[in-house]
């Protein structure tokens, strides 16, 4: 079939869509809504996985915890010295951190003691400065927490402790990092203040952050830790990565499952196409056959119709999904996928739309739609024109 003939068939298909404008517009809008919903969930979940990967890149290679009765407990400081004696371990740093309930926001915040060896990359993501390790009474807070409490750099913040008056600290810095998932509810204080707020004794820590010479040696160090003390639990980055993939994938499935009514639009359109052509379309195909069109020409024209509608809906749906996810920061969708509770971070999602994703969404939308359009068209075109016109 020549290029000129193909162009003529494409032009006739456009005219046919224009003659059935209402039905074509309804089909286009239904397919666009379905594509935008599925593509939006995919883009946001992929962007959140990329955000989690950035957080993991700044995390220690291993985190060692002690379990008592199946729940995390404090670890002795001597454990860090024992780990530094293992082969393949570059540094083992005890950390003091925990959760503190703030009645003013009716939620927990994460109190972390500043460890200079672990926050080297955080200096560039703080407005103001991090508190010095020995500067008691100073803190750095996450941007969302500062916004919820209405505090800025230089203001005084009172945190509840075991006394009736609470412990006050001066806000020395506010995290304005792009890694908002990591720092939204964060309060960084000197170690002495963290121990006082969380009730951690001087000879213990919450866990031990282990930095390895080579990350591939994580399984070896984990087995050595199990042999050292069976009550120890070692969490490596590979495990955290699998957990993130599982969590975001499951939440994306939940969101899509809750959006079944919207996705039913696509199913209704598919059933409408599969149930056969309307009377006017059958008459049109019969007239075309009677005027000399071949069955091949009819199928090519109907294929062009489906391709124009399917690709147009895919393009519009992808554009809407991209704007929803990355220009508007996915309102209504990002909180459901991120899973935050009281202090939801304002995450500036990094665009992650790739050619493979666009082609996949287009293929999943267009190919079934073309098949559901061409099959009934072939049945109608295969009939004798006189018989079809009499019907």
Image (cartoon, helix red, strand yellow):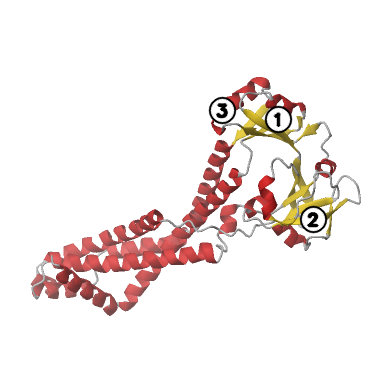
Can you tell which of label 2 and label 3 is closer to the viewer? 2
57 vs 22: above or below: above
Residue 147 rendering spot, x and y as whole percentages? 73, 62
Name the residue located 37 percent from the left edge and 67 percent from the top edge: 313
Residue 290 makes an appearance in the image: yes
Q: Which mark is residue 376?
A: none
Q: Residue furthest bottom?
A: 19
Total marks shown come to 3
Q: In 3D space, how far apart are the residues under numbered discs 1 and 2 (Cα atoms)?
A: 33 Å
Q: Where does the N terminus fall, quadrant-wise?
A: bottom left
- Residue 262, position in %: x, y? 45, 63
Judging by the rendered image, the residue that carries numbered circle 2 is 172
Q: Earlier in the sequence, mark 2 or mark 3?
A: 2
**Mark-to-mark CA distance, 2 and 3:** 40 Å
In the image: residue 217, left or right of residue 100: left
Q: Nearer the viewer, mark 1 or mark 2?
A: 2
Could you tell whether 261 is left or right of 85 in the image? left
Q: Earlier in the sequence, mark 1 or mark 2?
A: 1
The residue most toward the top is 227
Q: Is residue 181 left or right of residue 278?
A: right
Instruction: Name the residue nearer the viewer: 356 or 309.
Output: 356
In the rendered image, residue 365, in percent from the top left (x then y), is placed at 35, 59
Say whether residue 279 is visible.
Answer: no
Toward which corner of the image does residue 58 lie, by quadrant? top right
Residue furthest right as drawn: 164
Residue at 18% across / 75% down in the picture? 284
Residue under label 3, please give it: 219
Q: Where does the image place residue 88, in percent across and percent down from the top left?
A: 61, 27
Q: Tell which tag, 3 or 1, sits nearer the viewer.
A: 3
Which image quarter holds the C terminus?
bottom left
Per the image, the residue denoted by label 1 is 66
């Amino acid at each position: 079939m020549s290029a000129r003939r193909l162009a003529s068939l494409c032009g006739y298909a456009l005219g046919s869509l224009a003659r059935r404008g209402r039905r074509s517009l309804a089909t286009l809008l239904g397919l666009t809504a379905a594509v935008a919903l599925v593509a939006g969930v995919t883009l946001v979940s992929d962007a959140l996985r990329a955000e989690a990967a950035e957080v993991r890149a700044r995390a220690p290679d291993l985190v060692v915890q002690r379990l008592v009765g199946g729940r995390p407990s404090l670890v002795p400081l001597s454990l860090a010295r024992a780990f530094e004696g293992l082969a393949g371990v570059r540094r083992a740093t005890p950390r003091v951190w925990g959760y503190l309930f703030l009645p003013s926001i009716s939620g927990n915040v994460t109190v972390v003691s500043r460890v200079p060896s672990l926050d080297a990359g955080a200096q560039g993501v703080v407005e103001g400065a991090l508190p010095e390790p020995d500067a008691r009474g100073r803190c750095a807070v996450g941007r969302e927490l500062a916004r919820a409490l209405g505090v800025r750099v230089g203001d005084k913040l009172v945190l509840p402790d075991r006394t009736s008056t609470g412990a006050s600290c001066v806000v020395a810095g506010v995290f304005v990092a792009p890694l908002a998932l990591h720092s939204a509810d964060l309060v960084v204080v000197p170690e002495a203040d963290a121990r006082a707020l969380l009730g951690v004794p001087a000879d213990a820590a919450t866990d031990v952050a282990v930095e390895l010479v080579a990350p591939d040696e994580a399984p070896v160090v984990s087995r050595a830790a199990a042999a050292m003390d069976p009550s120890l639990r070692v969490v490596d980055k590979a495990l955290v990565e699998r957990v993130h993939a599982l969590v975001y994938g499951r939440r994306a499935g939940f969101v899509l499952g809750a959006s079944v009514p919207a996705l039913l639009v696509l199913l209704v359109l598919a059933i409408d196409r599969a149930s056969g052509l309307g009377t006017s379309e059958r008459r049109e195909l019969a007239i075309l056959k009677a005027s000399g069109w071949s069955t091949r020409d009819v199928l090519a024209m109907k294929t062009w119709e489906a391709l124009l509608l399917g690709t147009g809906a895919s393009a519009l749906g992808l554009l809407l999904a991209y704007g929803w996810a990355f220009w508007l920061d996915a309102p209504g969708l990002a909180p459901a996928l991120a899973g935050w509770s009281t202090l939801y971070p304002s995450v500036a999602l990094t665009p992650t739309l790739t050619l493979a994703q666009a082609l996949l969404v287009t293929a999943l939308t267009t190919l079934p739609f073309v098949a559901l359009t061409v099959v009934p068209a072939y049945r109608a075109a295969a009939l004798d024109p006189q018989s079809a016109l009499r019907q």
